[in-house]
Image (tube, rainbow, N blue to C red):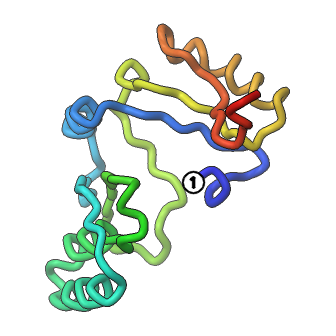
Amino acid sequence: MWRTYGTNGGLVRLSWRLNELVDAICNVTLRPGFTIYIGRVRYLKEQDLRTAIAELRGSAERRATEAARAVMHKRIGFSYENEVRICLVGPKASRPQDTYQVEGIFPEGTSTVLIDPYLPEWQAKSWTTFLSPFFKGRRVRQSAFNKDPSA
C-alpha cells in the first residue's frame, strides 16, 4: 500500500476495529444517490476470478451492486491480507469525484495511526506533530515496515 498509493507528501494509515468502523459507517450521512457497501474480500484462483467477474456483468438496474461485488474479489495469492473493503458508489456521472467527504466518522474510533515509512524522518515528525492533537490517547508514529528489525 505504501508504495502503490504514496506521493511526495506521504500517506497516513488509520486503522479501526472492524465492528467500530461498521458502526460508524452505518451512522454517516450520505448525499442522495450514494450507497456504501462493506464486504470481506473473496480470494479466488485466477480463472475462477475471471469467471466470477464475468458472471457479475449484466443487468443495468443492478450495476452498482455488481460493481461493488466485483471489487470484493482478489487473486488467491493475496489471501494472507484477510481484507475487508468499503466501496462508496454514487450516481452515474461523466467523471467520478477524486474525493468525497464523509461526515460522521470520528478519530476517537481509530485504533492505530501510522505515517508512511518511506518519508524522511523530518517529514514524518511533521505529520506526527500535526495529527497527534486529533488522536488523543493514541500513539501516532511512523510505520517501521521498511526498518531493519535488529536495529
Kindly identify which residue carries mark 1.
1
The residue at the point 70 percent across, 17 percent down is: 129
List the single residue furthest toward the top.
Answer: 137
Q: Residue at x 42, y 64 (%)?
A: 78
Q: Quadrant of residue 61?
A: bottom left
Rendered image quadrant of residue 76 = bottom left
Q: Quadrant of residue 28?
A: top left
> Does 98 appear above or below 125?
below
- Look at the image and tell me in which quarter the C terminus lies: top right
Q: How many marks?
A: 1
Residue 148: give x, y in percent of width and height.
73, 37
Q: Describe residue 27's horizontal placement relative to residue 137 as left or right.
A: left
Front one among 6 and 149: 149
Front residue (pair 90, 51) = 51
Identify which amino acid the numbered label 1 is placed on. Met
Q: Determine whether 10 is above or below 99 in the image.
A: above
Q: Position of residue 87 (x, y in %)?
A: 33, 58
Q: Which SS class for mark 1?
A: loop
User: In the displayed structure, would residue 4 be above or below residue 113?
Assistant: below
Number of residues whose C-alpha sits closer than 10 Å to that of mark 1, classed few (under 14), some (14–19) or many (20 or more) = few
Query: Where in the figure is residue 22, as x and y percent of width and height?
Result: 23, 38
Name the spot of residue 70 as percent of width and height, x first. Answer: 29, 74
Question: Taking 116 as reference, is 72 left or right?
Answer: left
In this rendering, the answer to whether 101 lies above or below 88 is above
Image quadrant containing the N terminus: bottom right
The residue at the point 26 percent across, 66 percent down is: 42
